[in-house]
Amino acid sequence: MSNLVVLNASNNNFQGLMPSSFCISSSLLAVLDLTYNQFSGNIPGSLGKCSALRVLKAGHNNLTGQLPDELFNASSLEYLSFPNNGLDGVLDDARITNLRNLSKLHLGGNMLIGKLPDTIGQLTRLEELLMSDNNMSRELPSALSNCTNLVTIDLKGNRFTGELTKVNFSNLINLRTLDVLYNKFTGTIPESIYSCSNLNALRLSGNSLHGQLSPRIVDLKSLSFLSISSNKFTNITNMLRILQNSSSITTLLIGGHNFNGEAMPGDDIIAGFQNLQVLSISGCSLSGKIPFWLSKLKSLKMLFLQKNQLSGPIPAWIKNLELLFYLDISNNRLTGEVPLALMEMPMLKSEKATTDVDPSAFERTVYIARGLQYRKLNAVPKLLNLGNNKLTGVIPKEIGQLKSLNVLNFSMNSLSGEMPLQLCSLTNLQVLDLSSNHLTGEIPLALNKLNFLAEFNVSNNDLKGPIPTGGQFDTFPDSSYERNPKLCRVTVDQLCGSAEPSAVSVLSTEQIDRRVAFWIGFGAFFGVGILHDQLVLSKFRGIMDTMGFNIVL
Ligand SMILES: *[C@@H]1O[C@H](CO)[C@@H](O)[C@H](O)[C@H]1NC(C)=O
Ligand SMILES: *[C@@H]1O[C@H](CO)[C@@H](O)[C@H](O)[C@H]1NC(C)=O
Ligand SMILES: *[C@@H]1O[C@H](CO)[C@@H](O)[C@H](O)[C@H]1NC(C)=O
Ligand SMILES: *[C@@H]1O[C@H](CO)[C@@H](O)[C@H](O)[C@H]1NC(C)=O
Ligand SMILES: *[C@@H]1O[C@H](CO)[C@@H](O)[C@H](O)[C@H]1NC(C)=O
Ligand SMILES: *[C@@H]1O[C@H](CO)[C@@H](O)[C@H](O)[C@H]1NC(C)=O
């Protein structure tokens, strides 16, 4: 095929070595796309002979070894893309400069080591530099400031060190996304960043940056996503006071800080943010109450305040946040009863899908623990997590109104009374955790009608009577019920109360298999991710297990 210009064989199951003879017969080849196949072995150096090659993509294969030296002879390359392979070695300082036309360099998800070469500054047409999830280290080259056409820099998940101030960001006037999540950067946020007037997403979380936030951050008029969680920043009062003046920020993640015993800033200091949709101030050991200024955040959809030392009651105004569908206030010191106002939350009552709400807050992937990510809003469950507080009283029967709730966690409180029958009308429930309370009475048998229930835990209460059977209840492990001495299993040859209670057996492999089968079926039915293999399956379960418990980055 001597006239072949474009070959697109992406999204197939081709195996073996990547073909090496392309440009021997087809010297006109300009586009070669082999993304999403199963090619293995090294990248053939003979691709360097493809003098007309502009686009070379072979991401999501099993390629190994280094980028071959000869490849850099293909000096017409504009788009070089090998993400999610097993490539190793360093980015060659001298050779990369041959690729003067390069505008997209996508090498994320490999095992590259070494530094980002100084010569990268010579690639002045570079628009996308995607090197996430490698093992690269050392300081960033200051020459990166010369790549003035850069729109996206993604360096997350490496071991880069030194100060970000090495780079003069004022020159990068086209920059829209800067993501350095999970590295080892130190120092302060470079002042030069505040000149990037097109910056839309800035993620600095998971580093060792320190200092107070500069008021200049509000100069970033296009900034919609800001995550600075898990660093060493100080003075949350100052931070929130500054940030509330930004009208562009819709997602703000500042959790995972030790603010030296500061209290949650109150209404004397904060008047309210304008357009926030997602707010995380989790894991900051903040004392004080759930502040009233939160009630003014009319666009709020997700609120993460877990792992602080907040005290006092859950405020009734919570029901006025009409778009809120994810509330995690677990692991605090909240007292009082579960307020009826919580049973009035509009998004949890209505079947309105979270997809109906503007998904712009999730243009960026939000990380809720390393390796787990929510990219689309509809992948995020509707959640109410009040676990590990000091709540007392009963579970209100009005709980039955929260028809669209997916995750309900009241565990580790001092709730008493019975499990209300109305729990059985929460037909979208996937996780129900009422463990470690003082609940009495029987487990409503009709709970076995909850077809999507995948996690169920009532352990460590004072429940009595039979454990429901049928439906999902044939799949839960014995640990779901343990430490309820009056609970018993009804089997064919043993009636409830006829033998030693709660001599419950270990989960059989058959039960485990059924449980896994449920998850696969669940995925196929709802298209939740692509649950086609065990890996993805276990990842999805990971999300469920750690839901609303980690620092959001
Ligand atoms: C190759 O085809 C896939 C699937 O149609 C498409 O998504 C991709 O953009 C194409 N590649 C190029 C380089 O045009
Ligand atoms: C191609 O690359 C190799 C190794 O980098 C080099 O020795 C050779 O001279 C180059 N060939 C051409 C035609 O540029
Ligand atoms: C990253 O590189 C360091 C040495 O530079 C090595 O000790 C470490 O094991 C590497 N990590 C991975 C995940 O390959
Ligand atoms: C950064 O670049 C800007 C614009 O080119 C320039 O005015 C400024 O002096 C530079 N800052 C440093 C610290 O080099
Ligand atoms: C926090 O910042 C404010 C300015 O907003 C300042 O008045 C206060 O002294 C700072 N607190 C600490 C502990 O540095
Ligand atoms: C419910 O919350 C408690 C306290 O945070 C936590 O320990 C538990 O793992 C959560 N349950 C589920 C099923 O995630």
Image (tube, rainbow, N blue to C red):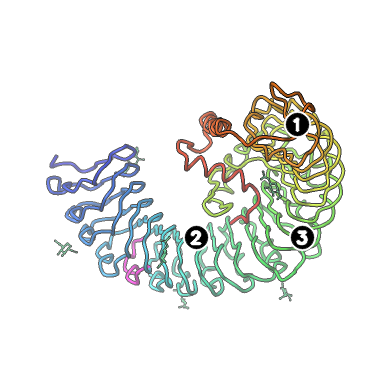
For label 2, the SS is strand
Q: Quadrant of ligand 5?
A: bottom right
User: With 358 as the anchor, is 421 left or right in this view?
Assistant: right
Rendering coords of residue 128 (x, y %): 39, 57
User: With 248 as the anchor, is 57 left or right in this view?
Assistant: left
What residue is at 24 percent from the left and 41 percent from the top?
7
Give the quadrant of the N terminus: top left
The residue that disc 1 covers is 488
Q: Verify CB contact (< 8 Å) between mark 2 and mark 3.
A: no
Q: Residue furthest front?
A: 499
For label 3, the SS is loop
Give the camera-side residue of 272 and 182.
182
Q: In the image, is residue 197 part of the stretch drawn in magenta?
A: no
Give the camera-side residue of 275 and 488.
488
- 504 versus 149 height, above or below: above
**Label 1, label 2: how many angstroms apart (C-alpha)?**
53 Å
The residue that disc 2 covers is 179
The 10 Å Cα crowd at callout 1, few under 14, some 14 to 19, many 20 or more, is many
Residues in magenta, as a range: 116-126
Give the amino acid at mark 3: Gln
Give the amino acid at mark 1: Cys
**Label 2, label 3: how many angstroms apart (C-alpha)?**
30 Å
Between circles 1 and 2, the one closer to the viewer is: 1
Specify the quadrant of the image occupied by residue 143: bottom left
